[in-house]
Image (cartoon, rainbow, N blue to C red):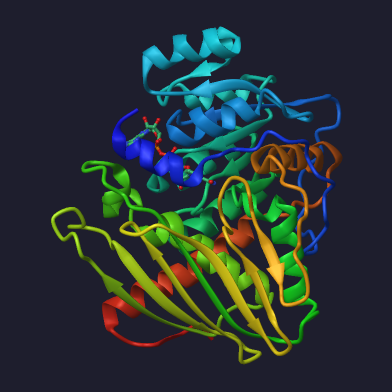
């Protein structure tokens, strides 16, 4: 691990391996998955064995109750051996990017989890759907809203589930903040402020490349955007965004820092930011009668919540375990998913508008 990876890991890591909390059904679940009832645990194949698969998802899949690490897809032959030895993955469940589509004939694999660079999410989600496999796709869902629509269509046509890796929806303190905001427990939400970012110093990583889906907004900004949407429970009607590049030599293609303002139908406003230049991880909501805070709000653990009336103190859970277990149960039982492809699409419509606002220097209407 190099120093840069180390600093990112130190900042957002500290995974908690605590027991999964009970599922809080908020917001209302929507969209149906095709049932897969004949198995105790569903087999997940991870596609792309980089940081998130290696450090978070694979170790977590050793603890999940309703899913397990059944297979891998990698372009690196050394990883095939290392992962086979470490996790006891059957040879027949190891694929590369060339023979990926043969996964259609493998009954051990129920769910394909796409953990690739953002520019590859649409292609591999669509190929997975055509192989008849359920899909979890990492955030951001794709490069733009148009790609998201084609992913949703492919999954519908092949009658497979599509969920997006928004793990905060499975975190109890975050779920309570959604409830307090959306049910107006402290009066109507008036202003949401949130920041999500870390200092990126890697020089040739795909996150610095526009064509690969790089940029702070795509990587971290979606957490701030999600917060504004899940606290208000509304879709923005307009967006205005500004971009800043301090380290111009590093950020030749993508934004280093973005600030963006959202206007909601109720009159609520959001002032949000994201950065590859600064560490930030907070949510601060002003309501008619008080405030709601999460600080940090998007880390893997220690999500710390309070309101003007109380400290939340809800259990810390292994977010990835809770997420993958719930998705597996929904698929097994044919129940609606908590985080659907449509949810990822809603974010990407706003992200498209954010980039348009920057390019045009204008407020962009979303209605
Ligand atoms: P990473 O760069 O560490 O891993 C990417 C993997 O894709 C590598 O194994 C790489 O070999 C492989 N790959 C295949 N084709 C490639 C190509 N053409 N160029 C570059 N790499 C290629 O990235 P990561 O941090 O693991 O992120 C992967 C995805 O997971 C992203 O979509 C990211 O947003 C998401 N992610 C989500 C969370 C979360 O908390 N939900 C956290 C980290 C990353």
Q: Is residue 294 left or right of residue 254?
A: right
Q: Residue at x 29, y 61 (%)?
A: 256
- Tell me if I can see residue 89 in this picture: no
Q: Dividing the picture into quarters, in which one does residue 297 lie?
A: bottom right
- Viewer-proximal residue among 148 and 301: 301
Tell me where residue 105 appears, x and y as whole percent.
62, 20
Tell me where residue 276 appears, x and y as whole percent.
33, 56
Q: Residue furthest left?
A: 249
Q: Is residue 191 left or right of residue 257?
A: right
Position of the N terminus by quadrant: top left
All told, the count of numbered labels is 0
Q: Residue at x 69, y 45 (%)?
A: 161
Q: Is residue 122 left or right of residue 18?
A: left
Q: Is residue 115 left or right of residue 159?
A: left
Q: Residue at x 34, y 76 (%)?
A: 356
Q: Is residue 284 above or below residue 157?
A: below
Q: Is residue 19 above or below residue 45?
A: below
- Tell me if I can see residue 312 in this picture: yes
- Viewer-proximal residue among 305 and 363: 305
Position of the C terminus by quadrant: bottom right
Q: Dividing the picture into quarters, in which one does residue 16 lie?
A: top right
């Amino acid at each position: 691990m190099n120093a840069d990876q180390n600093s990112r890991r130190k900042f957002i890591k500290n995974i908690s391996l605590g027991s999964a909390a009970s599922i809080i059904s908020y917001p209302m679940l929507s969209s149906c998955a095709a049932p897969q009832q004949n198995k105790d645990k569903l087999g997940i194949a991870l596609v792309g064995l980089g940081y998130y698969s290696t450090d978070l998802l694979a170790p977590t899949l050793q603890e999940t109750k309703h899913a397990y690490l059944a297979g891998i897809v990698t372009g690196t032959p050394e990883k095939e051996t290392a992962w086979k030895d470490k996790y006891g993955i059957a040879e027949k469940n190891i694929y590369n990017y060339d023979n990926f589509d043969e996964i259609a004939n493998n009954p051990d694999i129920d769910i394909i989890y796409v953990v690739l660079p953002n520019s590859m999410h649409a292609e591999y989600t669509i190929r997975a759907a055509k192989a008849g496999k359920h899909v979890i796709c990492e955030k951001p869902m794709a490069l733009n809203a148009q790609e998201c629509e084609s992913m949703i269509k492919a999954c519908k046509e092949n009658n497979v589930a599509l969920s997006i890796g928004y793990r905060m929806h499975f975190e109890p303190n975050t779920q309570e903040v959604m409830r307090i905001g959306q049910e107006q427990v402290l009066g109507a939400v008036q202003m949401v402020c949130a920041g999500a970012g870390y200092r990126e110093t890697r020089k040739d990583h795909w996150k610095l490349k526009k064509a690969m889906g790089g940029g702070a907004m795509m990587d971290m900004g979606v957490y701030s955007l999600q917060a504004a949407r899940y606290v208000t429970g509304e879709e923005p009607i307009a967006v205005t965004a500004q971009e800043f590049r301090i380290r111009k030599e590093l950020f030749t293609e993508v934004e280093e820092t973005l600030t963006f303002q959202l206007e909601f139908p109720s009159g609520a406003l959001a002032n949000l930011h994201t950065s590859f230049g600064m560490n930030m991880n907070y949510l601060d909501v002003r309501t008619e009668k008080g405030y709601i805070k999460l600080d940090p709000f998007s880390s893997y653990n220690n999500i710390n919540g309070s309101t003007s009336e109380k400290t939340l103190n809800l259990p810390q859970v292994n977010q990835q375990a809770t997420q993958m277990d719930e998705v597996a149960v929904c698929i097994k039982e044919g129940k609606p998913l908590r985080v659907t492809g449509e949810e990822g699409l809603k974010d990407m419509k706003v992200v498209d508008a954010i980039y348009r606002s920057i390019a045009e220097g204008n407020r962009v209407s979303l209605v």
